[in-house]
């Protein structure tokens, strides 16, 4: 969604705990009803219905998207994370439906927006602007963005947090976890409590706009030597812990480059992949949310615009070392070293390697083969994904092999996988090996 095309609907954000719980109850009830109907249909057709097939129907996913879009906050953010992290693992039609969560948020009605800004800036806040556009140019899970012009001529993008979002984080995460448990999508054999605690912590950090402003300043400093990548400047006068003000930077959605010349797509993804490598191996801090809406492209200047630093976090040195060992083994085409590095970093469990050594080795063979192809890597060629998915699903069917990687690895890998998905979307060709080698010395 670009600055001129956002056409989401105005809808008040449910604030109270009971109000939000009621929405979760209706979501669960709708999904349960959809599952019963789908199960009955499959039985009538002579099929033996499976829980996954009954749950992941377009009707159920559509209902979940609509309800989560209304709730916004942590509930919608977790839905967005699932839609991105699932990647190639969901059926294509369901991936497309879930992807709507990345740009489907409703915005606050004007009266609710005015109340929020009056609380943050005072009742006379409008007198401080020559222009404040009441319709947002973007709306997401935690806040919506407005374009404004100050009395002294500063053109700003102002992100306003939805009311009640911060206070609802813990309950929303617990409610989503309960829904996933009831659906059978999360295995009871794995203790996800540490992951839920980390999700609550990170979402609370994302809801702290003062913190995000500091991270935006940090990334501006880290990228000061990279003129083709630009970060907005923080406007401290209008920034509070629930309002984030920054310079307005024009740009078009990154996905709009799908029809751009091949060399443009290749160069843009070369920059983005280099940025991810610098975050991991040079900066020691990574913006871990790979949502496509966090990137803009300026066709007149050729610059890449980075937005949204709420999910920026330090990377544990042990995680950095694990990725470095894994990449060194991969670029050396040493299959045994790859397996050992994957185990040491926590990507796979000892049980998976022991019980499914053949499948793990075949996955390693596919990955190593792709990594060591000469020349640019063609992200548009997804022929190898099916083999990885098939082997991975067979391993996942064995409950004894289930494993939760370290939280720090999960967040870093989320950014890496999301970047690869964007490169696949743009069908970019990038010499990843050449980019990577300079960080492994």
Image (cartoon, helix red, strand yellow):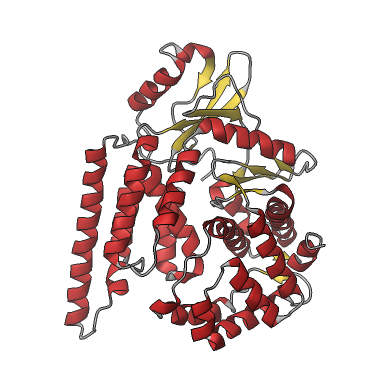
Residue 240 placed where, x, y %?
Answer: 51, 24
Q: Is residue 69 left or right of residue 86?
A: left
* Position in image of residue 90 (x %, y %): 43, 69
Foreground residue among 196 and 83 = 196
- Nearer to us in this view, 155 or 158: 158
Asked where in the image residue 148 lies, by quadrant, the reply is top right
Percent across and percent down for residue 40 are 17, 75
Q: Position of residue 127 (x, y in %)?
A: 49, 11
Q: In which quarter of the image is residue 56?
A: bottom left
User: Residue at 76% across / 66% down in the picture?
Assistant: 431
The quadrant the C terminus occupies is bottom right
Task: Identify the residue at image location x=37%, y=42%.
Answer: 169
Question: Residue 256 versus residue 335: which sits nearer the camera?
Answer: 335
- Asked whether 11 or 313 is in front, the reply is 313
In the shown orientation, is residue 4 left or right of residue 195?
right
Which residue sits furthest bottom? 358
Relative to 47, does residue 87 appear above or below in the rendering? above
Horizontally, residue 86 falls left or right of residue 329, namely left
Residue 386 seen in this snapshot: no
* Residue depicted at 39% across the width and 24% down the height: 116
Please report the residue visible at 59 percent of the width from the left and 73 percent of the height from the top: 343
Res 19 seen here: yes
Numbered marks: total = 0
Work out whether 250 lies above or below 121: below
């Amino acid at each position: 969604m670009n600055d001129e095309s956002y056409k989401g609907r105005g809808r008040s954000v449910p604030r109270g705990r009971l109000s939000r719980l009621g929405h979760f109850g209706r979501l669960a009830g709708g999904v349960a009803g959809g599952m019963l109907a789908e199960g009955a249909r499959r039985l009538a057709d002579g099929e033996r219905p499976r829980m996954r097939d009954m749950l992941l129907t377009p009707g159920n996913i559509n209902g979940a998207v609509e309800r989560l879009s209304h709730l916004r906050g942590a509930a919608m953010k977790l839905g967005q994370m699932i839609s991105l992290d699932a990647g190639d693992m969901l059926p294509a039609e369901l991936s497309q439906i879930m992807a709507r969560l990345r740009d489907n948020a409703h915005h606050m009605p004007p009266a609710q927006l005015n109340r929020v800004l009056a609380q943050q800036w005072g009742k006379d806040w409008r007198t401080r602007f020559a222009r404040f556009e009441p319709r947002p140019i973007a709306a997401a899970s935690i806040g919506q963005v407005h374009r404004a012009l100050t009395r002294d001529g500063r053109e700003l993008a102002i992100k306003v947090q939805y009311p009640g979002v911060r206070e609802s984080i813990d309950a929303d995460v617990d409610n989503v976890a309960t829904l996933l448990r009831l659906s059978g999508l999360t295995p009871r054999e794995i203790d996800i409590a540490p992951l839920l605690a980390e999700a609550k912590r990170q979402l609370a950090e994302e809801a702290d706009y003062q913190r995000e402003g500091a991270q935006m300043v940090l990334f501006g400093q880290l990228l000061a030597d990279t003129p083709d990548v630009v970060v907005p400047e923080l406007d401290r006068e209008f920034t509070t812990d629930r309002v984030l003000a920054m310079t307005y930077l024009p740009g078009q959605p990154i996905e709009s480059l799908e029809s751009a010349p091949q060399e443009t797509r290749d160069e843009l993804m070369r920059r983005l992949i280099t940025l991810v490598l610098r975050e991991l191996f040079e900066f020691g801090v990574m913006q871990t949310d790979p949502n496509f809406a966090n990137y803009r492209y300026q066709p007149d200047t050729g610059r890449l615009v980075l937005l949204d630093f709420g999910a920026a976090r330090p990377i544990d040195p042990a995680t950095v070392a694990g990725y470095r060992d894994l990449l060194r083994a991969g670029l050396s085409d040493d299959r045994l070293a790859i397996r050992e590095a994957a185990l040491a970093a926590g990507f796979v469990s000892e049980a998976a390697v022991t019980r499914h050594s053949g499948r793990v080795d075949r996955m390693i063979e596919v990955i190593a083969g792709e990594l060591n192809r000469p020349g640019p890597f063609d992200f548009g060629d997804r022929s190898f994904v099916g083999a990885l998915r098939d082997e991975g699903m067979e391993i996942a069917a064995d409950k004894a092999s289930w494993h939760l990687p370290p939280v720090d690895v999960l967040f870093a890998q989320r950014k890496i996988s999301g970047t690869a998905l964007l490169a696949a979307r743009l069908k970019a060709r990038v010499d990843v090996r050449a980019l990577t080698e300079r960080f492994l010395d």
